[in-house]
Image (spheres, rainbow, N blue to C red):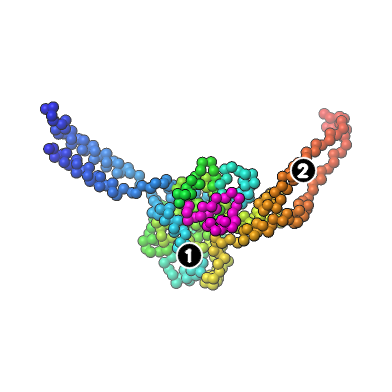
Amino acid sequence: MPNKHVHEVNPKRTVITMVLFVVIIVIGLVTLKSPRLTYTLTPLQTLNLVSSNSGSVYPYQLDAVLKGTIDTVILIDIRNKFEYSKGHIDGAENISAYDLTNKENIKRLKDLKKEGMAVILYGNNQLEANGPWMVFRQLGFDNVKLLLGGYQYYTLHKNDLAKTKDDKSYILMQPDYNYSEVAKATASPGSDIKKETKKAPVIKRKKKTKATAGGC
Amino acid sequence: MNKNYLFLAILMIILAGGLLILPERTNYTQINPEDLLWDIIQPSRYVTTDQVAKMLIEQDPTLELIDVRCAKEYDKFALPNAINIPLDSILSPNYSDYLGIEDMNAIFYCNDDILADQAWVIAKRMDISRIYIMKGGLNCWIKTIIQPTPPPETASGDEFDQYDFRKGASMYFTGASISAPKSDSKSQVTIKRKKKTKATAGGC
């Protein structure tokens, strides 16, 4: 008797333990919190992606989309409703950046990805859409692309998009100045600066009149 | 031997096999994609060149400027006291100590906004707080701080104040006359008290 394990004395106990064990695991699996959206790219992969410049759409490439020769592309305007209503690229849908991760929009994007459709995001400029584009790329939507130049560049070249192939003015990341030169060139204690300050209006206060008599 | 023991053992082995399909654990914290997008939309993540200039002049101890351009560009020209962390090595362990320092406001900048924005998004995802972008980058820095243009005459007083500040900042940063602003302020701040008018007669 003393040599026997407690479970062997009462086999039912083993069964109860097992049932409890299984129940706990099932509960654990059911309540396991799985995030709605997960990153599929690691930060390092993201870094390589943005350095490779592969997810960008150039304005001249838009030409074929707008003329309908490429119909596997959907344009999404991520600005707010008001800005969208003032003007947008023809055929673009409006999903404001605030709503991009909504349930319906995520589902929509997933469906588009399955159908093999490319999605081009654009904002007023490249910067505005850059963040949302990076988020969706990190979530594994590799069909999402970013329009360089944004809406501003598009409105400037609406009618000659195809000709902008050689125009590089929308390409950012380039210095506009030779910084070190500029920083030195202005180093003379400027003549114009002094002139400007002299122009500043001098406020003359009225002299107080001499002692006033009376009151009230 | 009890059959149940055998069954229990098999169950354990199966569950152990389940460990294989668990998601890979990352050695860094990261924020939810929804929160990341939300943070991206906030305009408060930008600081203006004026704010940066002011912090530099005031020698704000919490300011940490981070130049995300390549080392070659950084060597040619950089903002005072900026640290160079090229974008492609922002995840490198050599630089990890520079990010997420308590009480420090890290401000990314590049030639314009894009590289800084990319660095910002990656750093934000890894839950690094108090990071900002200098809006417009160095191009805007030159345009507004180093070579400010006077506002039109119809502009508001605030714009003139801003222009005056920029002119002063331009002198400060181009090294035109480092002593000038100090002496100026000393000589100009002479408080003149109004002379008291002679005894007034009457009153309530």
Q: Residue at x 50, y 57 (%)?
A: A129
Instruction: Give coordinates of residue A67: x percent, y percent.
Output: 48, 71
Residue corresponding to mark 2: B187
Foreground residue, A35 or B96?
B96
Q: Residue at x 43, y 50 (%)?
A: B33
Mark 1: which secondary structure?
Answer: strand
Give the Cα separation between the discs numbered 1 and 2. Answer: 58 Å
Foreground residue, A111 or B129?
B129
- The quarter of the picture where the N terminus of chain A appears is top left
Mark 2: which secondary structure?
Answer: helix
Q: Residue at x 42, y 54 (%)?
A: A44
**Direction from residue A207 to residue A144 in the image, left or right:** left
- Magenta region includes residue A70: no
- Magenta region includes residue B77: yes
Mark 1 or 2: the one toward you: 2
Q: Is residue A80 visible?
A: no
Q: Which residues are magenta?
A: B67-91
- The quarter of the picture where the C terminus of chain A appears is top right
Chain letter of the residue carrying label 2: B
Amino acid at pointer 1: Val
Instruction: Give coordinates of residue B102: x percent, y percent.
Output: 51, 41
Q: Residues within 10 Å of mark 1 (few under 14, many from 20)?
A: some
Q: Residue at x 84, y 30 (%)?
A: B203
Residue corresponding to mark 1: A57
Foreground residue, B98 or B6?
B98
